[in-house]
Image: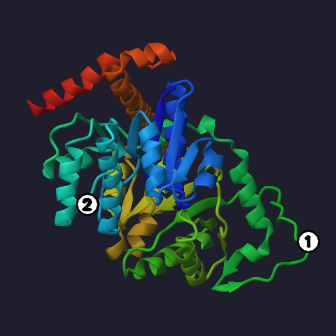
Amino acid sequence: MLRVAVSGYYGFNNTGDEAILLAMVSTLRALAQNVEITVFSRSPRETGRTYGVNAVNRWNPFAVAWALLRSDLLLSGGGGLLQDVTGVRSIIYYLAVVTLARLLGKPVVYYAQGVGPVRSRIGRWLTRIVSNRVDLITVRDQASKEDLAAMGVTRPPLVVTADPVLALSPQQIAPGSGEALLARLRSRPGDRQSGGDWEQPAAEADPPEQKEGEAAKRTLGIVLRDWQDHYDFKRIVAVVADRLVREGWEVILVPFHYPVDLQVCQEVSWLMQEPNLLVRERLPVETLFSLMGRLDLVLGMRLHSLVMACVMRTPCVGISYDPKVERFLETCGQPVAGRVENLDAERLYRELVGAWERRQEIVSRLDQVLVGLRQQAWETASLTLSLFYARSPHRRVKDGYAVRREARGIFRAALGRKKGAAK
């Protein structure tokens, strides 16, 4: 049995990272039968129950060391772990886990990492020293590869793939949960706000019925996060959202990192003068995927609100607080309305309306782009397993795993691409 340990930002109720874990688990299981996965999580019981994996407390050094000792391979990442914008302690933790795995003699793969920005000297030094000792690096965009090269990471094979979440498809998501969520929000007047005041719920209120001949409202989902000391962007989003509501749109504010994002969603909801819907509960990843597919348009700051919208073929517009947002939207041909520190209301409105008017063109482009991105996302898992079986071919025969391609061939192809790029 192949035993894989997974290190990342799991168990923190961050939908983006939970979606990454869902994608990693599903792709690894699709390519390797009976693989045993152990996740380092802040909430190990919930993680184990949700994904059907083993899970240990990420803060327990003895549990982490024992899990690594029992594992055949460590996967680090699946998200933006190698950055120190949120604090240098974060990058030190993830690199420490990698270092421990190498000390125990375990192969290490950076799994579709998003890299940067790493600004501190200690962060850049540690990244170079530790990363040059891992066995394979896959990154989710070209800029991440360039960031690693700029920090002096040269030794391991370095392959550009795609965000793990892009390996998922709409067919894997049950459509009913998103529709049920919207129906529940619409049926509870207490969840609908107007002008900063809660409306009192009516007893036994029924959802409003659509009148015959009346056009269905277009639904805009807004996914925001607080960023540093910026506040004015919330007022701008509220102003534009009010304008769209007056033009017939329905606005729903969705916290992706619960309860961290709930505060910013509440603030925008209170700033709005028109009725809006606010999700006040933590939602499962599958429900949020389903919701993204049910919306007509998504305005997102959180990277994975945009990734999930694209997976579900929903047009989206981004507000950038980090280069990773712009990188992804550029890849998918989706618009960026501006950066959080200088967001302009008129431009934001034009980008949202323009995305809606070009929705058919956007979806057609997504259908084309996602084919390649989905293949790259699957390649991350394939390369990972190929690395292990290329080094331990007897395990492949003994365990009876069916890897998608020949192990040695695919790993050598990765090395060939690296050499070709160097020339």
User: Between residues 117 and 396, which one lies in front from this camera angle?
Assistant: 396
Of the 4 image quadrants, the one containing the C terminus is top left
- Residue annotated with mark 2: 117
SS for dot 2 = loop
Count of numbered labels shown in the rendering: 2
Rendered image quadrant of residue 405? top left
Farthest residue in the right direction?
Answer: 204
Determine whether, in the image, residue 211 is placed left or right of residue 198: right
Which residue type carries mark 1? Glu
**Position of residue 338 measured from the top left corner of the image (x, y, whole percent):** 35, 66
Sort mark 1 into few (<14), some (14-19) or many (20+) by Cα contacts within 10 Å.
few
User: Between residues 7 and 306, which one lies in front from this camera angle?
Assistant: 7
Residue 174 drawn above or below residue 322: above
Q: Residue at x 44, y 63 (%)?
A: 301
User: Between residues 149 and 360, which one lies in front from this camera angle?
Assistant: 149
Determine whether, in the image, residue 30 is placed left or right of residue 206: left
- Gap in Å between the C-alphas at discs 1 and 2? 51 Å
Q: Residue at x 68, y 52 (%)?
A: 178
Residue 38 drawn above or below residue 217: above
Determine whether, in the image, residue 308 is placed left or right of residue 96: right
**Position of residue 285 measured from the top left corner of the image (x, y, whole percent):** 60, 51
**Position of residue 165 measured from the top left corner of the image (x, y, whole percent):** 48, 43
Q: Say which label, 1 or 2, has the lower sequence index.
A: 2
Residue 309 visible at all: no
Which residue type carries mark 2? Pro
Sort mark 2 into few (<14), some (14-19) or many (20+) by Cα contacts within 10 Å.
some
Residue 332 drawn above or below residue 281: above
Q: Residue at x 71, y 59 (%)?
A: 182
What number is the disc on residue 204?
Answer: 1
Farthest residue in the left direction?
Answer: 423
